């Protein structure tokens, strides 16, 4: 389920040997349309699916890293991030990058632990 409580399908299959999530639609494997907000929302939905498969949720996340192609989009992504992650917030880094897979604007990775 995403933040609004609607199912978005399973997380997409990985497109490479890495653990971050981009805004891929799990049904089509395509990057979602609508800009960085929709990409961030889908990336976090996908991350939520991965966490649930491991028996975890966003409450068990201890560290996230957000990769942005354009750091000017930080505020928009941060607003979406706040829909998913609640206090006490995990440690977080935001990194500006030159490019992301499939032309994505944002990628989010997380480290979680069983409590």
Image (cartoon, helix red, strand yellow):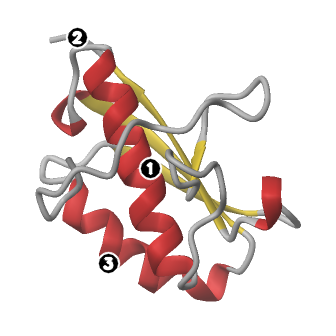
- Tell me the crowding category of disc 3: few under 14, some 14 to 19, or many 20 or more residues within 10 angstroms, Cα based: few
Q: SS class of the residue under badge 3?
A: helix
Which residue is at a point 16% across and 35% down the rendered structure image?
Answer: 59
- The image position of residue 17, as x and y in percent, is 77, 23
The span from disc 2 to disc 1 (Cα, nearest Å) is 19 Å
The reply to whether residue 100 is visible in this rendering is no
Query: Which circle's residue, 1 or 3, is located before the other in the chain?
Result: 3
Query: Which circle's residue, 3 or 2, is located before the other in the chain?
Result: 3
- Tell me the crowding category of disc 2: few under 14, some 14 to 19, or many 20 or more residues within 10 angstroms, Cα based: few
Which residue is at a point 71% across and 80% down the rendered structure image?
Answer: 70
Residue underneath mark 3: 79
Classify 20 as above or below 112. below
The span from disc 3 to disc 2 (Cα, nearest Å) is 26 Å
Q: SS class of the residue under badge 1?
A: strand
5 left or right of 26 in image: left
99 left or right of 106 in image: right
Classify 88 as above or below 50. below
Which residue is at a point 46% across and 75% down the rendered structure image?
Answer: 38
On the image, which quarter does residue 55 sit in? top left
Task: Report if the CB atoms under discs 1 and 3 are less than 8 Å apart.
Answer: no
Residue underneath mark 2: 114
The reply to whether residue 35 is visible in this rendering is yes
Between 72 and 101, the one nearer to me in the picture: 101
Residue underneath mark 1: 92
Between 93 and 25, the one nearer to me in the picture: 25
């Amino acid at each position: 389920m995403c933040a609004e409580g609607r199912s978005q399908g399973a997380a997409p299959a990985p497109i490479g040997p890495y653990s971050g999530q981009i805004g891929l639609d799990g049904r089509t494997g395509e990057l979602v349309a609508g800009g960085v907000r929709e990409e961030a929302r889908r990336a976090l939905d996908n991350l939520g699916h991965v966490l649930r498969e491991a028996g975890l949720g966003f409450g068990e996340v201890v560290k996230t890293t957000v990769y942005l192609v354009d750091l000017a989009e930080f505020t928009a992504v941060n607003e979406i991030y706040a829909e998913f992650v609640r206090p006490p917030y995990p440690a977080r880094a935001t990194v500006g990058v030159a490019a992301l897979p499939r032309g994505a604007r944002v990628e989010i990775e997380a480290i979680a632990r069983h409590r």
